[in-house]
Amino acid sequence: MTVELKVAGMTCGHCVKAVTSAIQARDPAAKVEVSLERGTVRAETSLPAAVVAEVVAEEGYKVAA
């Protein structure tokens, strides 16, 4: 399943690594693509969208509804 989220507050490579690592901690097979320019996180994952959003929010970023 592909999940795409609008995420605010990501500004650097550390943000990319933090979000990617957090999602892959829950689904090691997930393919995660973070765009700082667009403010999006796109993940090919078996996790439901709500779980991906929760994981990103737990890292301290604001996920748009």
Image (cartoon, rainbow, N blue to C red):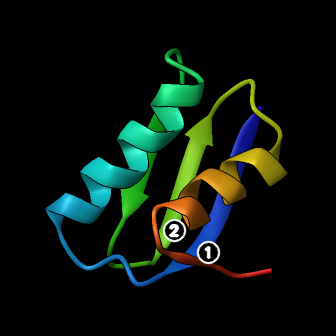
Task: Name the one closer to the observer, 55 or 36.
Answer: 55
Residue type, mark 1 in image: Lys
- Compared to residue 22, the image places residue 34 above or below, namely below
For disc 1, the marked residue is 6
- 11 left or right of 40? left
For disc 2, the marked residue is 40
Q: For the residue carrying disc 2, how many other residues have a C-alpha within 10 Å: few (<14), some (14-19), or many (20+)?
A: some
Q: Are marks 2 and 1 in contact (CB under 8 Å)?
A: yes
Q: Residue at x 83, y 39 (%)?
A: 48
Residues under labels 2 and 1: Cα distance? Answer: 5 Å
Residue 22 in the image, given as x and y percentages of width and height? 45, 42
Residue type, mark 2 in image: Thr
Point out the image quarter for the C terminus: bottom right
Q: Residue at x 56, y 61 (%)?
A: 58
Residue 19 in the image, given as x and y percentages of width and height? 41, 52
The first of marks 2 and 1 along the sequence is 1
Q: How many circles with numbers are drawn on the protein?
A: 2
Point out the image quarter for the N terminus: top right
